[in-house]
Image: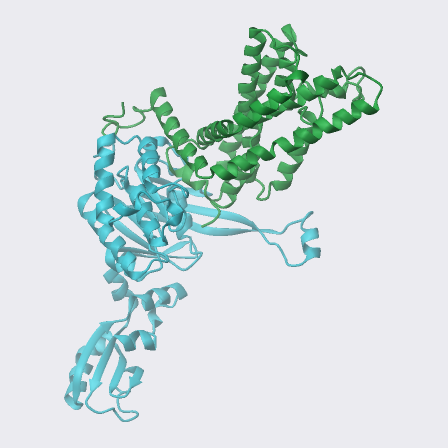
Chain colours: A green, B cyan
Amino acid sequence: MNSGTLAEPGRSGRGVLTSLHIWWRMLVICLEERLAYRSDFALGTLMRFLPIVTQVFLWTAVFAASSRSDIAGYSRDNIVAYYLLTMITRAFSSMPGLAGGIARSIRDGSVKKYLIQPVDYVSFLLASRVAHKLVFYAVAVVPFAIVFFVCRSYFPPAPDALTVLAYLVSLVLSFLLGFFLEATLGMIGFWFLEVSSIIFAYMLLQYLLSGHMFPIDMLAGIPTGLAGVSLADVVRWLPFQYTAYFPASVWLGKVQGWELAGGLVLEFAWLVVMIIICRLAWWRGTRRYSGFGG
Amino acid sequence: MHNRSESAAEPVIEVAGLAKEYRVYDKPEGLWASLRGLWHRESRTIEALRGVDLRVERGEFLAMLGPNGAGKTTFLKLLSGIITPTRGAARVLGHVPWERTDDFRRRFSLVMGQKNQLWWDLPAAESFRLHQEIYQIEPRRFEQIRDELVEMLDVGQLLGQPVRELSLGERMKLELVAALLHEPEVLFLDEPTIGLDVVAQHTIHEFLRNMRRQRAVTVILTTHYMKDVAALCERVVVVTKGSILYDGSLEQIVDRFTTHKVVTLDFEEPPAAGQVERFGFPCDIRGPRVTLRIDRTRIAEVLPELLAEKQVRDVSVEDVPLEEIVAGLFRGAAAAAVPAAEAVGAG
């Protein structure tokens, strides 16, 4: 496939197949790199289960203290199922170290490698992140399976095939959306050398607005000042809910029919918007880049 | 290898009025100043490069010399498209570097002394494979080139080891292999021998000389070591404060910027005080060994006179060491390049 590209001028060899080939090699090499740190990885995976346990205890206590059997449409069982499901969404959408890593590569100059070589940095990061996730799933599948088996009584009956399909689509989109949100965040490093506080502020915002902390339906009672518009209505238009809440609510049957379809369309639209912003940030950033670090 | 559109007569690198300014923020010391810095920061502009013109033909090996902060690395960063200039134009292989087209990027390489293109946690062989894909090197060609480079640098036994476990010299050699796999037509080397021991330096010199014989590769290297220059480059560009101070051959530097020769004499008897001064400026007197600085125009008349008058066991006439000349150039006082006592005493 590659034969003769050396002798031919220009971009002749640059077909889709070639790009896929490069991408595959990047994926393989990132997998190998990931596996070099597998024990560290296994530990990191187990640590992820701790917050969920405390959440379950917290909500059990909340329901025990209150006389109501449901809060904002969630029963106690619903809440536990919801948190377990957001854990799945987060396993797709969270990108530990991505934004910080990009900012660091800008600050210490290692981003130069990608400016010099005929390779696209963002595609490269994406390949590396897919590899990261694949290794994570391979390690996490057993503990996840155990937790879900133990907690199976909290879940409603499994949804129909079409909903499961929509759920899977929303998960894949949530991975991509999470990736481009954080990659864009990291590119702020071109403008500010120190981005850790910006990243921290973003994480906090995203924790609150994504449904990671509590289901965003619970924001329905909070007014925004605009007549008839609650905070939940605003949050539903933002991209953050797709990184935790939305896929979980699809599985639980909280969004259905047109609402579900609209949600997927909005998720896709946000993905396109973030890809464009990310590209633009990279384009503008590399133009003002001054090649720090020797 | 590459039969590209531009003809052989066109220069590989053409630079006109290239300038780069950086804005830097001064951060005064102290907490109060830091707090004030939140509202108002003093910035000033640094001219890293002030309108440089340069033409480099295919196959040339060019050394850039200059003190720290002279603009050498900025120049290489501009030519490899890492940064965009404030003013001026540049073409490398017919491309504007900072447009960063894939076609351009497939045809050059930049090796920066301590920055690695190799993956830290993986064996170099893996990084090479990735390069094969990125640069779209035909598999058989890739293996051939790789084996050739690996043999030349004698690094075969290092390919399977994670790069982080290698020494600086070993890593540098593998960096060079990685940089040359795609047979770049232009190679930028930013201090390629920095921190290496003498053996490793020598290996890299040998290797680059070989490369030069075998391929029509054009090389610009920046360095602080005159050994690199003497071993590799006949053309030297001296940069200070963002401008080119000298552009010419290595020999011409000596001709143009030195007025003296260094003459070392071994007398039979240590000369009495005040006896040698009339022949030239004595830089060093150690017993019977005397080192004199003698005006180049007078050397033909002074030396016979001296030899006739004194009992001399041995004599050597040398140019002022290159380090001294260049250091003098850096100081902007080239004509007054006075050889340091120990540098001459050793010769």
Q: Left or right: A58 with respect to A157?
A: right
Q: Position of residue A212 (x, y in %)?
A: 67, 26
Which residue of the protein is positioned furthest toward the front in this rendering?
Answer: A150
**Which quarter of the rendered picture does the N terminus of chain A lie within?**
top left
Can you tell which quarter of the image residue B58 is in? top left
Residue A263 seen in the figure: yes
Residue A237 at x, y = what percent? Answer: 67, 18
Query: Which of the 4 image quarters holds residue B79?
Result: top left
Identity of the residue drawn at 71% across and 56% down: B32
The residue under the point 27% across, 93% down is B272
Tell me if A42 is positioned left or right of A59 in this view. Answer: left
Residue that protrudes farthest toward the right in the picture: A67
The tally of labels here is 0
Task: Give the residue displayed 22% in from the left and 75% down from the top.
Answer: B297
Nearer to the camera, A136 or B171: A136
Asked if residue B73 is positioned above or below residue A100 in the image, the reply reads below
Estimate the x, y position of residue A103 in percent, counting from the top left: 54, 40
Q: Residue at x 67, y 50 (%)?
A: B37
> Looking at the image, can residue B13 be seen?
no
From what the image shows, is residue A192 above or below residue A141? below
Name the one closer to the observer, A102 or A144: A144
Does B29 sit above or below residue A114? Answer: below
Q: Residue furthest bottom?
A: B272
Tell me residue B256's x, y (percent): 27, 65
